[in-house]
Structures are given as structure tokens and as C-alpha cells.
Image (cartoon, helix red, strand yellow):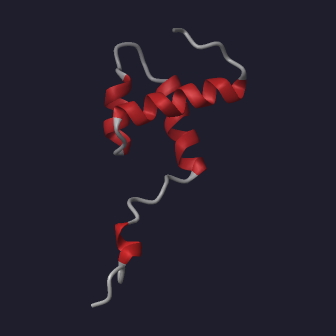
Amino acid sequence: MRCGAGRKDLAGPKPDPEEFRQDVVRVARNRGPGVPVEEVAADFGVHPKTLWKWMRRADIDDGTPSPE
């Protein structure tokens, strides 16, 4: 086997489609009281930090100030 053969298998996971990201962010923003972002992330199979990152990016894209 040549060095580097089959390397594309090691490229890592494909990024999530933008429509999926938007759907997850929308659900997270509209979650009920007492529902943590971590629960929404688990329901969609994404890491909570990833969902927080998507939400921050959406806030920036929407021109919404961050609550930090």
C-alpha cells in the first residue's frame, strides 16, 4: 500500500448543511423556559459548544448584540 493511499477517509466529518444549522439554531432560540441549550443540542446530535458557536454566528449575521 502506498503512503497516503485512502487518505480521504481521514479527512474528518463533513460539515453540517447550512439549512440544518439554521433549523437547530431556530429551535434553540425558541426553546421553552427551563430547556437548556445542551438538551436541544443532544436532541439534534450536535455538541453543545457547537450549537453555542452556531448561535453566536447567527447573532452576528443577524446584527443581534451578544448577551456576554
Q: Is residue 25 rendered to the left or right of residue 37?
A: right
Up/down of 28 relative to 66, above or below: below
Q: Residue 2 appears in which quarter of the rendering?
A: bottom left
Q: In x, y percent, where is residue 6? A: 35, 80
Q: In x, y percent, where is residue 22? A: 58, 40
- Asked if one can make out residue 27 in the rendered structure from this viewpoint, the answer is no
Q: Residue furthest left?
A: 1
- Asked if one can make out residue 44 in the rendered structure from this viewpoint, the answer is yes
Q: Residue 62 appears in which quarter of the rendering?
A: top right
Up/down of 12 relative to 43, above or below: below
Q: Residue at x 59, y 48 (%)?
A: 18
Q: Which residue lies furthest to the top in this view?
A: 68
Q: Which residue is drawn at 65% across and 13% down?
A: 65
Q: Which residue is drawn at 53% across and 28% down?
A: 55
- Along the line of sight, the residue nearer the viewer: 66 or 28: 66
Q: In which quadrant is the N terminus drawn?
A: bottom left
Q: Is residue 5 rendered to the left or right of residue 51?
A: left
Q: Residue at x 52, y 24 (%)?
A: 29
- Along the line of sight, the residue nearer the viewer: 43 or 21: 21
